[in-house]
Image (spheres, rainbow, N blue to C red):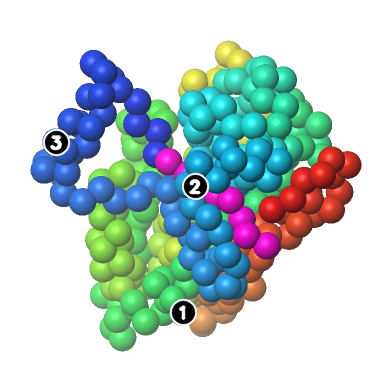
């Protein structure tokens, strides 16, 4: 089996034709080498997993796809490739897709060659199932590079009790006042040492360095569709005390005026008791943090074992291949690779 995989970063012209190329040069000069975002990491880690399995693939071979329109292709990322390239091939689309079907209400009707849509996690599948037939959408997480994110990153002497990972994306000023600052004040009152890292404002090596000196992590995010960063942390065998507020999906582009969805929405959608503990609000944080610290000191958490059992590069790539194979076998049409 040779997979046909396609991924490109969305980078449209903004002010004048072809200015995307000029902006790319300027970004490189000003910011240095671009770091991969979440969507790109889905593509990168899937390819790494396929390499480990020895599965062959063609990557961005547009000419081959055009010459073989009957062959199944796998399009990762947003919709721009499908809309721009107008593939004739049957398509598995995802897992980094649009945030909600309401953004493209006629997407499947206009692209009937899309056979399956992959989304990063189980609660997102439930949200998509409201708009699509349940057999159209599949929950599939990409794997974590457990060799890079390993306990070898940890220093023998952890210098701080907590790394506070701030990934509060919406109403940040409000949550800063009613959640983040009170948490930091509580840590100070109880003589817990801590450092803060803010999503979007750090490099990968910064997170590596801070994880190396941290006993545990307090993870603050409204919700995650998969949550690569917290899973990378778990892979280093660092337990997490996670804010899992529940409630509605909060994306302000759609909530509350277009979409109200609150079934199993979570900031840690891939998780069990080995990973750490969760709290819903500030009150639960104060109630449970002592227990969390005691469990961590007693070494009762084993987050890396959870990752190794569920989210390695190989296991997730194998699941991807199984999805492809299942579609090929179940199709009434003559799909093939």
Q: Residue 140: x and y, percent?
A: 65, 52
Q: Can residue 168 be seen in this view?
A: no
In this rendering, position of residue 56 left or right of residue 180: right
Which residue in the protein does label 3 denote? 26
Give residue 8's position: percent from left, percent from top.
43, 41
Q: Main secondary structure of the magenta part?
A: strand
Can you identify the residue that label 1 sits on? 297
Residue 297 inside the magenta-drawn segment? no
Q: Name the residue under label 2.
A: 61
Q: How far apart are marks 2 and 1 (CA)?
A: 51 Å
Mark 1 and mark 3 lie on one chain; the one further toward the N terminus is 3
Range shown magenta: 1-8
Is residue 7 found inside the magenta-colored segment of the image?
yes
- 228 or 171, nearer to the observer: 228
Q: Which residue lies furthest to the front in this view?
A: 67
For mark 1, does the 10 Å Cα neighbourhood hold few (<14), some (14 to 19), or many (20 or more) residues?
A: few
Helix, strand or loop at label 2? It is loop
Tell me where residue 95 appears, x and y as whole percent: 58, 45
- Residue at (84, 40) in percent of width and height: 333
Q: Which of marks 2 and 3 is nearer the N terminus?
A: 3
Helix, strand or loop status at disc 3: helix
């Amino acid at each position: 089996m040779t997979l046909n995989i396609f991924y490109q970063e969305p980078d449209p012209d903004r002010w004048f034709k072809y200015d995307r190329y000029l902006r790319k040069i300027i970004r490189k000069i000003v910011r240095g080498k671009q770091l991969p975002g979440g969507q790109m990491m889905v593509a990168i880690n899937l390819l790494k997993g396929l390499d480990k399995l020895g599965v062959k693939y063609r990557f961005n071979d547009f000419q081959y796809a055009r010459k073989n329109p009957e062959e199944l292709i796998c399009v990762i990322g947003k919709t721009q490739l499908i809309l721009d390239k107008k593939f004739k091939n049957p398509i598995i689309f995802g897992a980094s897709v649009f945030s909600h079907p309401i953004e493209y209400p006629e997407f499947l009707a206009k692209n009937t060659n899309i056979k399956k849509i992959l989304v990063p996690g189980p609660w997102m599948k439930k949200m998509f199932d409201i708009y699509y037939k349940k057999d159209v959408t599949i929950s599939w997480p990409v794997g974590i590079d457990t060799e890079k994110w390993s306990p070898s990153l940890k220093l023998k002497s952890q210098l701080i009790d907590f790394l506070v990972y701030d990934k509060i994306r919406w109403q940040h000023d409000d949550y800063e006042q009613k959640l983040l600052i009170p948490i930091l004040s509580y840590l100070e009152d109880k003589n817990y040492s801590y450092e803060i890292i803010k999503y979007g404002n750090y490099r990968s090596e910064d997170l590596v360095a801070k994880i190396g000196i941290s006993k545990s992590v307090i993870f603050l995010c409204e919700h995650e569709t998969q949550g690569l960063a917290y899973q990378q942390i778990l892979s280093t065998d660092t337990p997490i005390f996670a804010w899992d507020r529940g409630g509605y999906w909060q994306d302000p582009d759609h909530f509350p005026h277009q979409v109200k969805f609150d079934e199993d929405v979570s900031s840690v959608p891939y998780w069990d008791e080995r990973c750490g503990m969760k709290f819903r609000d500030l009150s639960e944080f104060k109630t449970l943090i002592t227990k969390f610290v005691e469990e961590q000191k007693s070494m009762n958490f084993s987050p890396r074992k959870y990752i190794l059992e569920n989210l390695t590069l190989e296991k997730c790539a194998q699941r991807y291949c199984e999805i492809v194979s299942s579609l090929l076998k179940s199709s009434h049409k003559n799909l093939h690779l």
